Amino acid sequence: MGNSYKIRKVKSSMKKKGFEEENGGNHLKYYFQDENGNRTSVFTVMSHSWLELKDPYIGKISKELNFDDKNQFEKYIECTFSKIDYINVLKKKGILTKE
C-alpha cells in the first residue's frame, strides 16, 4: 500500500508553492503561476469530496503537474522539494522558459 496525504495538506503545500485555486463546480482546479505570477498551462483538478490523496491519484497528479516521478511530487507535498526546485523541473522540460 502506498502513501496517502490529507487533502488539506496537499492543497496547502500547492498554494504555498505557486498554485492558484479556482472553484470549478464539483471540482477544484489548481493552476501553477510562474515567478511573475502569470498563470501557466500546468494544472490539475481535485474533487471537493476528497479527504485524502492516495494512489492511483498521487501518480496521476504527479504526471499532470510534470514532476519527474511520484516520489518528487510526494517530496513537494512534504515540503522537502521547493517551488524553485519545481520551477527548475518545468524549465528543464521546456514547459517554462529559461531566463
Image: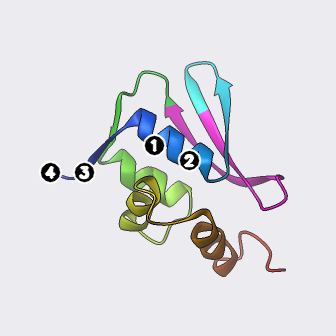
**Of the image marks 1 and 3, the number of the one nearer the N terminus:** 3
Q: What residue type is labelled 2?
A: Met
Q: Disc 2 designates what residue?
A: 14
Residue beneath disc 1: 10
Identify the residue at horizontal 60%, vertical 48% (top origin).
Answer: 16
Name the amino acid type tagged 4.
Met
Q: Which of marks 2 and 4 is in front?
A: 2
Up-down: is 73 above or below 44? below
Residue 18 in magenta stretch:
no
Above or below, 10 relative to 46? below
Q: Could you tell me how far apart the alpha carbons at marks 3 and 4 are, in whole angstroms?
A: 7 Å
Q: Residue 1's mark?
A: 4
Measured from the top left, where is residue 43 in percent x and y? 64, 48
Helix or strand or loop: what does disc 2 sit on? Answer: helix
Numbered disc in front, either 1 or 4: 1
Q: Where does the magenta region start and end?
A: 29-46
The crowding category of the residue bearing disc 3, from other C-alpha atoms within 10 Å (few below 14, some 14 to 19, many at least 20), is: few
Q: Mark 2–mark 1 contact, CB under 8 Å?
A: yes
Q: Which of marks 2 and 4 is nearer the N terminus?
A: 4
Amino acid type shown at disc 1 = Val
Percent across and percent down for residue 28 are: 59, 30
Pointers 2 and 4 in contact (C-beta within 8 Å): no
Which residue in the protein does label 3 denote? 3
- For the residues marked 1 and 4, what is the alpha-carbon distance in whole angstroms? 19 Å
Q: Is the magenta stretch mostly helix, strand or loop?
A: strand
Q: In this view, does 6 lie above or below 71?
A: above
Q: In terms of sequence position, does the residue under pointer 2 or pointer 3 come before the other? A: 3
Hey, what amino acid is under mark 3?
A: Asn
